[in-house]
């Protein structure tokens, strides 16, 4: 089965129907999104399609890029682009197989059930200890070829640590991915093409463009030792720039001899060839060095840039500044937005007849354990139509808003903790912060939309009025949560009235205090007047 010819990609049409297509149909204007039964599969398929287009599309200029955005290529054109790399996408057969170690023999490694390709599947130690309490074993004993290919792709992209010598992905286990998409939605092609850059800009970015032999892009076309020494390391300079989309940290060989017919438990379709197991072995490609994946934001850790990963608490507007503009709230930290985001906002692609959004997703991993899958959309409104100076003005405003919001969340958490337990309590109170960020999100985006519109039209931003309004909204959210959800709504017999009253007064003082006003860039001398103004807000 060749993945460039086989209709294995699940997609949704504009009328809501679902179908399966080959990659040559990606430009079909009736398609609006990938439509797998698992969200991590949809994220992996989007990266597969972007990687395939970035690797093969002969687009050298911004003018040509715009032309293909407005008039998508035909299926015949896509087939011409893909033909030179077709042999790299065979899933089965005796030769090289897609994202599988061609040197691994059936009797050479450990045999795993095919369900182990799924990120959340219980590991060997969990099964040995009979500790698969929440994610049970045996939920996908045999899966169809289409889902097997997608599961393999998803694992190689997100590969968490898996024991001695079982390598993590090129961006570490469970990386955060941020893609640019149209708002409102247009078609699958438009969302994919927004994340593809001109070849010159892409090839100059990272890796060694002179390494044009196919295995430097698709590592499964040769043995591991063709790229790195035995148990050695692999740096960007040792491969072609497009390798970032086709990394293969895990040594895997699917077993197509032990198949059966039946219903695939993942997609629910009948198949006469369900895969039951695969062979795996440790010490695959060991990605080290300054890898810079174009679809992920990075943070600076001492002298190194590391890919960001979703964290407990999920995705919210507190991430907007870093992931959209590449700016941190604290001056002593450095962030870098994904290269594709930077390119879209800096390359004059604002004239796209619409606004944009950021699609962010990824696994929150605790070593090899998947704690959660997070996925969210962050609106960009008209930011893609703002020039650099206007984007910088938006950045400065939003930085102060988020600094104020962080303080308000801290004040709320401290007050609730004091009301519940007093000063000595310890434990996980992250639910308080999550509630605050969630409750204030709509106000943030409403104000952000107004701010970007003013910046887009090159208008004057009334900083004091905007900051004062944001402070009033933060204050209202924090007080409401204290009163109606966390403390005031508690059973009276379980309350300590004195402690609750003191905590409430302290929360009020903090929300009217100098610290939060300074964080928002408000004058601190008129504390009393501003507090009164804040109290007067509806």
Image: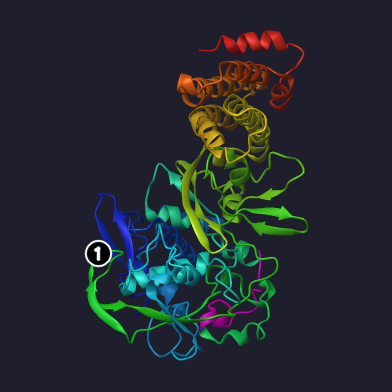
Q: Is residue 514 above or below residue 138?
A: above
Q: Position of residue 9 (x, y in %)?
A: 34, 65
Q: Position of residue 430 (x, y in %)?
A: 56, 39
Instruction: Say which of 366 and 436 sits in front.
Output: 366
Q: Position of residue 374 (x, y in %)?
A: 48, 50
Whether 22 is among the magenta residues is no
Q: Is residue 191 above or below residue 431?
A: below
Residue sticking out furthest to the front = 493
Q: Residue at x 67, y 21 (%)?
A: 510
> Can you identify the residue that label 1 sits on?
268
Q: Is residue 2 visible?
A: yes
Looking at the magenta stretch, what is its main secondary structure? loop
Q: Position of residue 136 (x, y in %)?
A: 37, 63
Whether 210 is among the magenta residues is yes
Identify the secondary structure beneath mark 1.
loop
Q: Identify the image quadrant of residue 237.
A: bottom right
Indicate the quadrant containing the N terminus: top left, top right, bottom left or bottom right. Answer: bottom left
Q: Residue at x 63, y 79 (%)?
A: 211
Instruction: Say which of 154 and 205 sits in front.
Output: 154
Colouring style: rainbow
CA neighbours of label 1 inside 10 A, class few (<14), some (14 to 19), many (20+): few
Judge from the rendering whether residue 333 lies leftward or rightward of residue 478; answer left or right.
right
> Which stretch did the figure color magenta?
205-220
Judge from the rendering whether residue 269 lies leftward or rightward of residue 521; answer left or right.
left
Q: Identify the image quadrant of residue 264.
A: bottom left
Q: Identify the image quadrant of residue 456.
A: top right
Instruction: Say which of 87 and 248 sits in front.
Output: 248
């Amino acid at each position: 089965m060749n993945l460039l010819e086989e209709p294995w990609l699940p997609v949704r049409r504009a009328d809501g129907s679902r179908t399966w297509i080959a990659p040559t149909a990606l430009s079909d204007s009736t398609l609006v999104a990938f439509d797998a039964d698992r969200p991590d599969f949809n994220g992996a398929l989007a990266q597969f399609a972007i990687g395939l287009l970035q690797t093969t599309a002969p687009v050298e200029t911004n003018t040509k890029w715009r032309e293909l955005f407005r008039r998508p290529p035909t299926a015949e054109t896509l087939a011409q682009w893909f033909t030179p790399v077709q042999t790299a996408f065979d899933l089965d057969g005796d030769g090289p197989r897609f994202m599988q170690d061609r040197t691994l023999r059936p009797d050479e490694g450990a045999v795993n059930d095919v369900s182990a390709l799924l990120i959340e599947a219980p590991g060997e130690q969990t099964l040995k200890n009979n500790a698969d309490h929440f994610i049970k074993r045996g939920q996908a004993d045999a899966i169809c070829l289409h889902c097997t290919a997608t599961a393999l792709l998803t694992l190689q992209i997100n590969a968490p640590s898996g024991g001695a010598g079982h390598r993590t992905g090129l961006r570490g286990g469970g990386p955060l991915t941020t893609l640019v998409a149209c708002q409102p939605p247009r078609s699958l092609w438009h969302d994919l093409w927004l994340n593809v850059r001109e070849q010159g800009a892409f090839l100059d970015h990272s890796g060694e463009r002179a390494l044009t032999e196919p295995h430097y892009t698709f590592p499964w076309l040769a043995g591991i030792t063709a790229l790195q020494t035995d148990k050695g390391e692999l740096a960007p300079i040792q491969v072609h720039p497009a390798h970032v989309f086709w990394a293969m940290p895990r040594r895997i060989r699917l077993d197509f001899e032990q198949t059966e017919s039946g219903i695939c438990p993942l997609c629910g379709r009948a198949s006469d060839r369900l895969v039951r197991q695969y062979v795996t072995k440790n010490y695959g490609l060991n990605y080290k060095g300054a890898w810079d994946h174009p679809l992920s934001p990075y943070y600076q850790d001492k002298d190194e840039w590391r890919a960001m990963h979703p964290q407990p608490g999920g995705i919210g507007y507190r991430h907007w500044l870093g992931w959209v503009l590449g700016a941190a709230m604290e001056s002593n930290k450095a962030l870098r937005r994904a290269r594709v985001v930077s390119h879209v906002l800096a390359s004059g692609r604002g004239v796209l007849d619409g606004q944009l959004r950021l699609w962010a997703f990824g696994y929150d991993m605790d070593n090899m354990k998947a704690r959660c899958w997070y996925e969210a959309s962050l609106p960009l409104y008209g930011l893609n139509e703002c020039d650099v100076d206007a984007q910088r003005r938006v950045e400065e405003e939003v930085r102060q808003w988020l600094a104020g919001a962080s303080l308000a969340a801290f004040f709320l958490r401290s007050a609730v903790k004091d009301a519940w337990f007093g000063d000595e309590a310890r434990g996980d109170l992250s639910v308080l912060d999550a509630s605050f960020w969630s409750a204030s999100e709509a106000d943030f985006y409403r104000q952000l939309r107004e701010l970007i519109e003013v910046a887009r039209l090159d208008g004057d931003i009334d900083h004091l009025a905007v900051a004062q309004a944001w402070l009033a909204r933060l204050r209202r959210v924090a007080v409401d949560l204290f009163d109606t959800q966390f403390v005031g709504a508690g059973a009276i017999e379980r309350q300590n009235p004195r402690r609750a009253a003191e905590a409430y007064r302290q929360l009020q003082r903090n929300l009217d205090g100098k610290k939060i006003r300074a964080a928002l860039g408000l004058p601190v001398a008129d504390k009393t007047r501003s507090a009164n103004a804040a109290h007067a807000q509806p």
